[in-house]
Image: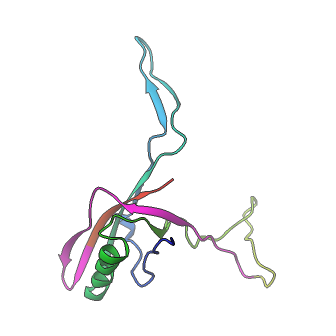
Amino acid sequence: MTLPSWPTDLPEPVGDGFRIARGERRRRSQGDQGPPRMRRGISKSVDQVQMMLVVDHNERARFERFYREETSEGALPFLMPDWSRNGDYLTMADGTFLTDAAGNRLTMAVTWPCLFGDQLPTYSAIGGHWQLSFVVTVLP
């Protein structure tokens, strides 16, 4: 089974509305006195990513089709670009850009396997556009 991919015809998230919350991977134990002890807990946890997009009516319809049909109302996993790193140039330790044989700079292509999170998509009207907000869970 191939996972559906995030629609490329939708805009990227708005900068202020893109937040990544790391999943807790540590175990904390509190003794009788002193600071708590921290140790590594689980090796895999899930990160939560909050997103906000500003879409027009056609883009909202495209998102609705993706959500309802391609992910079965958010029940199926999908692939989504990591907009915090996707498209960044690859560099070496000294800061020089990595290039291919023709001299073109190489960029990162980072994709997450995701599920829609507990906060399901919500819409707010902004003039002739819609502010679309939702949370995705990045799978380990």
Residue ID at (34%, 64%): 75
Q: Residue furthest right?
A: 101
Looking at the image, residue 21 lies above or below residue 12 = above
| Magenta-colored span | 104-131
90 sits to left or right of 68:
right
> Closest to the observer: 42 or 82?
42
> Closest to the observer: 89 or 64?
64
Identify the image quadrant of residue 11. Answer: bottom left
Residue ID at (27%, 58%): 119
Identify the image quadrant of residue 59. Answer: bottom left
Q: Residue furthest bottom?
A: 58
58 sits to left or right of 110:
left
Q: Is 140 a magenta residue? A: no
Looking at the image, residue 45 lies above or below residue 17 = above
Q: Residue 67, position in %: x, y? A: 32, 73
Residue ID at (33%, 83%): 62
Q: Is 112 a magenta residue? A: yes
Q: Residue 122, position in %: x, y? A: 22, 68
Identify the image quadrant of residue 33. Answer: top left
Q: Residue 26, position in %: x, y? A: 49, 35
Looking at the image, residue 52 lies above or below residue 23 = below
Looking at the image, residue 34 lies above or below residue 73 = above
> Closest to the observer: 109 or 7?
7
Count of marks, rendered view: 0
Q: Residue 99, position in %: x, y? A: 75, 76
11 sits to left or right of 37:
left
